[in-house]
Structure formats: C-alpha cells, structure tokens
Amino acid sequence: MSSSRPSCGTWKPSNDRAMSERKHHDRHASPSPSPTSDPLPHRTEELEGHVEDYFEVDELTSKAFDVRWGTLPGLRFWVEEINNIPIAHRYIFVSFSFFLVGGFLALLMRWQLVVPGNDFVDAETYNQLFTMHGTTMMFLFVIPFIEAVANYFMPLLLGTRDLPYPRLTALAFWTYTWGGLFIFSSFLFGVAPAGGWFAYVPMTNRNFMPGLGMDFWDIGLSVAEIAAMGAAAELIVSILRMRAPGMALHRMPIFAWSMLITAFMILFAFTPLIVGTAMLEFDRKGITSFFVPELGGEPLLWQHIFWIFGHPEVYIMFVPAIGVVSQIVPVFARRPLTSYTLVVAAMLATGFISFGLWVHHMFATDLSPTAMGFFAAASMFIAIPTGVQFFVWISTLWTGRPVVKTPLLFIIGFLAIFVIGGVTGVMLGAVPFDFQAHDSYFVVAHLHYVLIGGVVFPFYAALYFWMPKITGRMMSERLGRWNFWVMFIFFNVAFFPMHISGLLGMPRRVFTYQAGLGWDALNLMSTVGALGFGVGAVMIVVNLIWSMKAGECAGPNPWDADTLDWWEDSPTPDAQFKFIPFIRSRYPLWEQDSFGPQTREEARLLEPLRSKPTRWRGALVVSVIDAKPLAIVKMPHPTMAPFTMSLGFILMFTGVLVDNLWFLGAGGAVTTGAAYAWFRPRPDEDVAIEEIGTDSADDKLPLAMAGPMSNGWWGTIIFIIVLAVALLTLIASYFYLGKGPSAGTPIVPELQSALFATIASLVLGLVIYATGHATRRSRAGLRRIAIGLALPLTSFFLYFTIQAWNETGLRAVESAYGSIFAALLAFQWLVLGLLLIILVLSFLWSLRRPDDPRGHGITLNGELIGYFAVASWLLIAATVYATPRLW
C-alpha cells in the first residue's frame, strides 16, 4: 500500500479552501442518520470572526509543501523514509504477518492434539511450537500492531503532521522487524527456543537448557521490547504536545486517551522485563548468578519480574481495544458516548490497578495468605472499571440509532466473548479455585477468551473501520459479515470446550495424552474449531485484496464519523494537515461548522504553518492541558540513520549470541556511525532557525530547539523514567535476594571509595545546575566553565564507583549477592558514561557555536541526565552501603 496512491474520487478542487468546503459538505450531506438528530441532541457552535482566507494559498506554495513532505522515490523509499504513513503501512503488514504465522503454529499444535497418542510432532518440537506461538502473539503481534495503527492514525486524530520523533518511528520499526526475524531464524539452525514464552528458571538456565535456543529468545525479545518502548515514547509526546489548537485534554478522542495510558503502561511494564531478560542472559553466559539457587539466587525472582510485566501486558493489550471500541460505537450508534468521562476514568483505573495483580499468576507458589488475599482482592476489583465501560457502550447503543455494519458486528462479538473471559478471570482470582485450575486447560480457555475476544475482535473491527481511510476503498460488507460469523462461531467451538477439558484435569503444555480420560472429543472439537477460526482470520486478507481491486471509493468520511481523522482525504496524503485545524468540540466533524481560526490573531500566529514551511518540515507544539499554541518544532528530514542503526543493533546482538567480539565491534562501529549521522547538524536546521528564530512574542511563535519547549527535552524526561524504573527493579531485586550471600562473603562493604563518590556526586549536582542556569541565561562564558568542571567531576565520580566495586572483592558469578551488587554499580557506570558523552558534545558546542540553540538543547537535556546520575547514586549507595548497616 502506498500512501501516494491517488484518491479514486473524480472531484478535483481548485484550491485548498474548496477542498475544506467540499469535505464539510460531504460530511453533512451523508445519507446516514445525522448524529445531531439523535435522542440526546448536542449543540452546534456558532463561530464568529472566522478568517475567510485561512485555507487559501497560492499553487506554488502548495506544491512546494507537498514536495517537502512527499514520499521518496525508488530504493530511498525503503531505507530512508521516516514519514509516519509509510512506516505505519510496513508496521501493520509485518505485525499482521506475525499474527498469521503465530496462528499457523497454533494450528500445528492443535493438530498434534486432535487424537490421543498422536505422533505428528515430538515433545521437543511441540515445546518449540508452544514457545514461539506464545512469544509471537504476545510480543510480535499485539503490541506492535496496535502501535502501528496508532502511528498511522494518531497524527490524524490529533490534527498534527507527524509524530514527534519520525526517525525513532523508523528505528522502532526496523529494530522490531529484525528482532522478530532474529527469533524466528532459530528454526533455520534447529535451535528454536523451547522454554515457554514465560521462560521460567531454573528450567531455562544453561544447565537445564543448553544450546542457543533461549539465547535467541532472550536477545531477540529484548530487541522487540526496546522497539515497543520507543514507539511508546513517540505516542506520549505526540499526544501531550502535538495536538491541534483547542484540542484540550477533555476534547481528545477516546483512542488517544487509550494510547496515552497504554504508552505509559509500556514504559513501566516493559522496563522490568528488559532488566529481567538481561539478568537471565548474563546467568546463561556464566557471568552472574541471579537465579542460581545454590549460589544464593532465587528462581521466584524471575517470576516476580516476568509477571509484573506479564499481567499488566494483558491490559496493555486491552486498553487500546477499549479505545477502539469507544471510537467505533458512537459512529454506528449515531450519537456520542453516554459518558466520555467515565470511560476515560475507567481506563485510568484499569491501567493503575493492573500493576497490582501480577501475583495472580503465582498463587500456587509459596506465598503468605495475606499476600494472596491482597492480590485476590485486586483481581476482583479490576472488574469494576471494565463493567463501567461495558455499561457505557451498551447504553450508547441502546439510546442511539445503531447502524449494524461489519465493524460494529466485531464490537458486539467482543462484548459477548470478553464477558465470558472476564467471568472466568474472576473465578481464577479466587485462590481456592486457582489452586485447582492452575496450569490446566481452563486457564488456556480463559486466556484466549480474554486475548482473542478482548483484543483480536476489536482489532478486526478497527481494520474494517479504518481500512477505507488507508486504502481509499471500501471493503466488501458481505464478505465482512461472513468473516465475522466464521470467526465468532469457530472461536467458541475451539476454546469453550477447553474450559471443560481443564476442569476434567487436562494440564496445559502437554504434547499428547492417553485415550479414555474424557478429553478425546473435546480436543477433536477444539481442533476443528481452531481450523475454522484460522480460515476466518485469513478472510480479511481476501477482503482487502478484493477491495483494492474492486472496492467502492471511500471518500473522506464514508462512515459519517465524528473525529478529525476523517477530515483528510482517503487514502491519507503524505502531506497531512497542510492547514492546521482549530478544534472547539469533542466531536469536531459533527459539531463544528469550520476548522479555521476565529480571529486574525489566531491566523497570524499560525501563518508560518499555513501550507508552510516549504524549505524544511515544521509542525506545531501546544500546551499539555488546553492545547494553546506554544512553538513551532523543526521535524527531521529523511535519512538512512535509523535503518543503518538497526543493522548495527543486530550485528551487536549476534555478537552477544555467539560470543564473537568481531560481530560486537562491527555492530558498535555501525551504530556509532549511524548515531553521528542522526545527530549531526543539518543545513535545513539552519534555515529553520533563520526563518523562525527562537525568540517568542505575543504575535509570533518561536522555534522550539531547547528546554521544555522542545520535543527533545520531553524525550529525555521519558528516557529518565525508563532508567528510574530499571533502577527500582534492580533495587527491588537486591532486597528480594536477601541480606547477603552465603557465609564467608562480606555483607557490609567498605565505605571509603563510596564516600568519595558521594562527595563527587553532590558537587557534580551543583555544577550541573550551574550549566543549566548559564545556558538559560545565555551566559556563554559561565556555561563553558561549568561544563569544563563537570567533565573531570564526572570522571572522578565514575572512577570512585569503580574503586568501590574493587574494594568489595566480590565476583558476580560467585554469588547472587555479588551479581546484584555488580548490576547496581554497572547501572551507575552506564548512566555516567552517557553523561560524559553528552558533556563532551555540550563542551564542543560551547566552544564552536556558543549561541546556537541546538547546543543549548544538548546542554539542557544533559542537565536532566546529570540530576538523575546524582539521584541514582544516592539511591544505590543507600541501598548497598546504608541498609546492610541497619540490618
């Protein structure tokens, strides 16, 4: 699918003003029931003082803008493109392909279980299929797919031209793709992982699972996780900072709210898993002993780390589905949601409570009754916000005038299936019942009713709803209805019998079973249902191919929808929002008569973005709460750096996999070169600074290049959040592993070097403040002196922390205590190393171009990293030096 494909409509506007008027007319002339005539009518705003010429621009400027944002030709399109539309096309294609592959693996598993004693595959192969099926669906399909959809539609929903970090979008896609292929390449070498998608230790330690299978899983999964977190950072900054003027938080589309909550959940859930997989890989390499019981390690620590990711991940998948459902239901009910506020509040509650449920998966371990009671209560409590959302959706349909099309059918299917999954989830939240059903096929049935009913069905609704916007063609309604009924019927045929087989005692993850246990007919039925569901899942591909060739022209808004994504043409042009819209309603396409400014002052403020700039890519940043225009941001140009950097990552991870320093060094060199290409100054940045300037005024927006105005500063804040979560994961692991190692190892470490490091950190904090203060005050000399002092202080700080490790006499491989002590200090070394790099770059900018705002941006971002470096050391020192003296 190419975003440059022309619309199939025959209407050709003479100018952009006519385009806007034509779109507005088309929406309000729709033959479908008007949403403004529903049983609960809502007010249409009367606009005053509309600036008539806002949508008028000369043809030369319009074409220059299109060229600036246009798709690259030939091979450059594949390796340099960073626009959100083509990258999202690729993301959707790759993630859905992984879904089909994961489904095929599931069918192979079901075929093995179709009859008792089947020898279609052996036990090892079945374990590999099981591991890769779960890994594919949980890590390579659901999260990447919804992030891909969000990458495409979030700028459209928010009224902005692109995501804030387009290069990061491209890097996340390439890294995710290579990471997924990296894991699947294990099949080519006959070493596919077989430890389950949860990789429980000590089963997955090197002693019990030799070979490279779990190393493929560990490393490839880490790559995919990093990509998901990069996409999450994109969405957070985009939603908070890059909305259309007037789109205050209370006017944001529900889907934007759902993705904002999901993105924060990804940061807090995926970070512990990245830390955990790193710990597991170091154990497998024989470098550490985090999970080795005979050396003081604790296998249950892995379960805690994994499930503090794993259970929130269920809601990381479900919350976007809530957004999809809440986005689609009002369109086909022909009325707004009965309570927008309750749905948003319920999503916030779901996201928060989900992090208090992870022990729900560990009731069968040795936990105290008090702990089990707390987590059982939380498992019940999370059903409340879900119930609130269900009542809002049902009441919206009940009080509206439903138009039943394929997207709404999939939503109705979701409502029916997810209720069953939710009820069985509450059952499993009861500790006595969980003891009986744990690790049985009842849990398999519950999991799939939640994930397929609660995620896949809404995702299919989203595809049928938004595919006309992506392709410009309507999908077949008849084939869509067949698609729904085949999937709905065969899903229940496949998975409902698993409840019964589980209650009859069939354990999960078994590759065969004996006849006469009462499971034969149930497994046959489940296999038939799985085959039918697989056929249904593929039907959407057939429908898409048909629609691309013979589907009706969609037009801008075929559903008469209410949100801004349907304001642009179908398919969406590369140059989105040539004219930035002004939003004054939660349902702009239903309630607004115009999207232009109301006053000359508003028009003058956005004049630099009215089909401009044409020599560089520019977008608008707004205030977080009320979306008031704050500044213009320079968007990156197309570059090979993300593609090249992703190749460097894969080379490095291959080196880690096979313990080859040549691969590791080559990957590091490629990554370093790509980073230089990424961050080096560009001529179009100079043009942007010259045209706009960085000084603000009442009637002029500045260029955001440094500090809280810039997207880079916000990205640094998110990066620090990730670092903080990683540090807290390590500190929690330290306390979980106990007071110390086995006899003979010093529990209370020496203080000398740690005290010197602490003094250096406190002085460094003061100097870092001076660098930021001098930068904000534009005092170039003081800034240069402060950075010059910060460099040796950081070096001394790093030296004393290394000496602190040497004084302990510990070796990470000899005890779990030594492993976690080393991990905490290694974390500090990484932070200080990053700070040193930033300080060197800042110092070079201060010498060569002291007044350049780009150098100021690096310095102010480094200020944040410096503060974190000081705070992290104080936490680490308190943990490993102070607390042992209190025990």
Image (cartoon, rainbow, N blue to C red):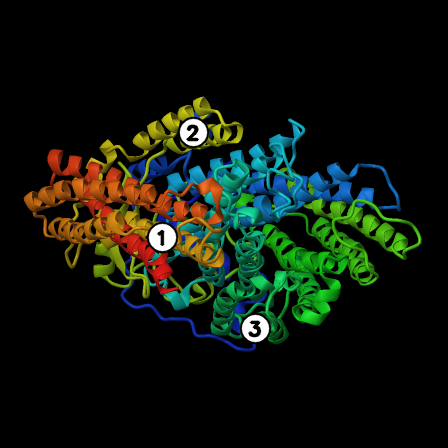
Give the label on residue 619, or none: none
Visible residue check, residue 56:
no
Dot 1 corresponds to which residue? Answer: 718
Query: In this orientation, which residue lies closer to the viewer: 716 or 576?
Result: 716
Dot 2 corresponds to which residue? Answer: 648
Q: Left or right: 837 with respect to 642?
A: left
- Give residue 833's position: percent from left, percent from top: 29, 40
The amino acid type, in three-letter code, at marker 2 is Gly
C-alpha separation, residue under disc 2 versus residue under disc 3: 46 Å
C-alpha separation, residue under disc 1 versus residue under disc 3: 31 Å
Query: In this orientation, which residue lies closer to the viewer: 209 or 617?
Result: 209
Q: Is residue 323 above or below residue 666?
A: below
Residue at left 41%, top 23%? 666
Tell us which disc is closer to us: 2 or 3. 3
Mark 3, residues whose alpha carbon is within 10 Å: few (<14), some, or many (≥20)?
some
Query: In this orientation, which residue lies closer to the viewer: 796 or 421?
Result: 796
Visible residue check, residue 461:
yes
C-alpha separation, residue under disc 1 versus residue under disc 2: 24 Å
Mark 1, residues whose alpha carbon is within 10 Å: few (<14), some, or many (≥20)?
many
Question: Which element carries disc 2, helix, strand or loop?
Answer: helix
The amino acid type, in three-letter code, at marker 1 is Ile
- Give residue 546's position: percent from left, percent from top: 67, 40
Q: How many marks?
A: 3
Give the label on residue 374, or none: 3
- Give residue 650's position: percent from left, percent from top: 48, 31
Q: Is residue 802 above or below residue 402?
A: above
Tell us which disc is closer to us: 1 or 3. 3
Tell me which label, 1 or 2, sits earlier in the chain: 2
Residue at left 82%, top 62%? 500
Which quadrant of the view contains residue 806? Answer: top left
Question: Which element carries disc 3, helix, strand or loop?
Answer: helix
Q: Is residue 693 above or below residue 497?
A: above
